[in-house]
Every structure is written in structure tokens, then in C-alpha cells.
Image (cartoon, rainbow, N blue to C red):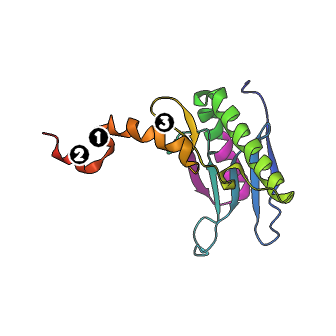
Amino acid sequence: MTNDTALTRRRSENSHEETWQIYFTDVRVGTIGMRAGVPIHADQWGWSIGFYPGMEPGAGRMGIAASLEAAREAFDAAWTELLPSIPDSAFAEWRHDREWRAAMAAKRARGEKLDSEIRNTLMRCVCGTTFDSWKPAESYPHREHAKERPFADPEAAAQTP
């Protein structure tokens, strides 16, 4: 990724906030906005850089400023310093997560269940065989394999010297 790609700013859709979301290509990398609940004599603008997943926790930057222009300048300076240390894989990880979330939302919108919500009674034995745990004829033969693993039984494990 080249460092000369410009940042773009998009106004937040929340009309009650004066906030801009900052994008580097298609990845939202930070925000600049008016701070809420601060005294009138304090700096009114805040900015932050960071995105998850992708960047390591604590790797981002943040600050406050007296004006929008000062916040933009501080953001740009911090971004210029931080960008060379962000690997391309961080942006790819963020995009992958965004696509996964969109796929899950689309599935929900169609009224489908997520894979994790579909009951599955298949299990894999230590011998490598996959069987249906709700079918006794398939599961009973694998009870013997559990006996071969004494530490699978907490009482047996506790008695082992």
C-alpha cells in the first residue's frame, strides 16, 4: 500500500453529532469529532486513529484540539507517522471482517439461521471417526476409546500420582 493515498473524511450519519469518519482507501481508520460533556473552556475537538481487527490493541493514537482544523492537522501528522508501521495484512484483516459481518447480516435479512445456530450432533472420536452422538449404534462403540484416555475422566485423573 502506498503512503501517498489520501485520507477521505465522511460526515457521520448521526445528525446530532458533529463527527467525521476518516477512511484510508476503503478502511475506516479513525474519527474526528466534537467531544461530549467537556467544560466550555476545554478543547472541544477530539480525534482518534485505530481500527480493529487489524491493528494491535494500544497501537492507535488519539488527541484533543481546540478547533476542527487543529484536530485535522494533528490527525494527519499522527497518521503520517503511524502508517509506515501498519502492515498491509492489517487492512486485509479489517476488510475480511467487514465482508464476514456483511454476509452474516445478509443471512439474517433473508431470515436464515447462522451456521452456529443449526443444531449439529456430529462428533469426532479420538480414533478419528466422525459419528452422530444421537444415534446409539454409532456412539456406543466409541465409549471404549474414552476408557483408553484416563485423563478424560476427572476422577481417574485425580487418582493418578
Q: Nearer the viewer, residue 157 or 143?
A: 143
Which stretch appears magenta? 59-76
Lower sequence index among marks 3 and 1? 3
| Disc ID at residue 156 | 2
| Disc ID at residue 104 | none
- Residue 113 in the image: above or below residue 7: below
- Measure the alpha-carbon separation of dots 2 and 3: 20 Å
Instruction: Give the residue at the far right of this rendering.
Output: 110
- Measure the alpha-carbon separation of dots 3 and 1: 15 Å
Lower sequence index among marks 2 and 3? 3
**Residue 147 visible in the displayed image:** yes
Of the residues shown, which amino acid type is indicated by label 1?
Answer: Phe
The residue tagged 1 is 151
Q: Quarter holding the N terminus?
A: top right
Q: Residues within 10 Å of mark 1 (few under 14, many from 20)?
A: some
Q: Residue at x 60, y 33 (%)?
A: 81
Marks 2 and 1: CB-CB under 8 Å?
yes
- Measure the alpha-carbon separation of dots 2 and 1: 6 Å
> 38 left or right of 14?
left
Secondary structure under badge 1?
helix
Displayed quadrant of residue 38: bottom right
**Residue 70 visible in the displayed image:** no
Of the residues shown, which amino acid type is indicated by label 3?
Answer: Cys
